[in-house]
Amino acid sequence: MSTSKIKAAVEAMVLPYLNEHGFELVDIEYIKEGSSWFLRIFVDKDGGIDIDECGRISEYVSEQLDKNDPITGAYFLEVSSPGAERPLKKPEDVRKAVGKHVFMTTYEPIDGLKEFEGELVAFDGDTATVRIGKKEHSLPYGKVASARLAIVF
């Protein structure tokens, strides 16, 4: 089974449980690092998620994976919070980040740049506006390669 099909199968398994218990699925990764495969599930909720909640979710996911078995071969299962520099994967994630410090990259240069770190001042579903210093940059959402929250030091 392809990586994208595995991620979709895992998402279909875990999403009802997460929704029922007030958690948000942030991302799923199924990647090879060295000689080992890792299935990583990133979850969050309003107010943050703690280690006990990650443990309960991990137990549920492990049971579902044993029952449905979408992955052949050995892998490590990790369930965790997305952390302080949470990825912004969906338009709704970007919408919630308005007013926060973000780091975005684009597939091609916009205003001569491919990396934008600053305050996300607006997002209308089609365009993200990032203020860097006193200058605002309008990024067409379809040209955003990656986006995440960023910590200001």
Image: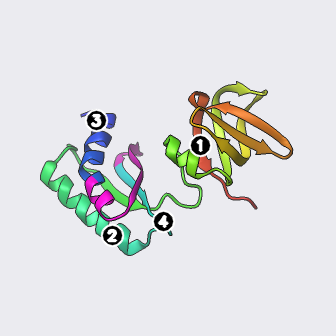
Query: Mark 4 and mark 2: span between their CA atoms?
Result: 18 Å
* Label at residue 123: none
Judge whether 99 appears above or below 113 on screen: below
Kindly give the residue lying farthest to the top in the view shown. Answer: 108
Residue visible at 26% across and 46% down in the picture: 12
* Residue sitting nearer the eye, 149 or 29: 149
- Residue topped by disc 1: 147
- Residue topped by disc 4: 46
Query: Mark 1 and mark 2: span between their CA atoms?
Result: 27 Å
Task: Check if mark 1's residue and mark 2's residue have beta carbons within 8 Å.
Answer: no
Select label 3 or label 4 by which is in front: 4
Image x and y of residue 145, in percent: 58, 33
Indicate the secondary structure of the residue bearing disc 3.
helix
Kindly give the residue lying farthest to the right in the view shown. Answer: 134
Image x and y of residue 95, in percent: 57, 46
* Label at residue 55: 2
Mark positioned earlier in the residue sequence (1 or 2): 2
- Residue topped by disc 3: 5
Query: Mark 3 and mark 1: span between their CA atoms?
Result: 23 Å
Tag 1: amino acid: Ala
Tag 3: amino acid: Lys
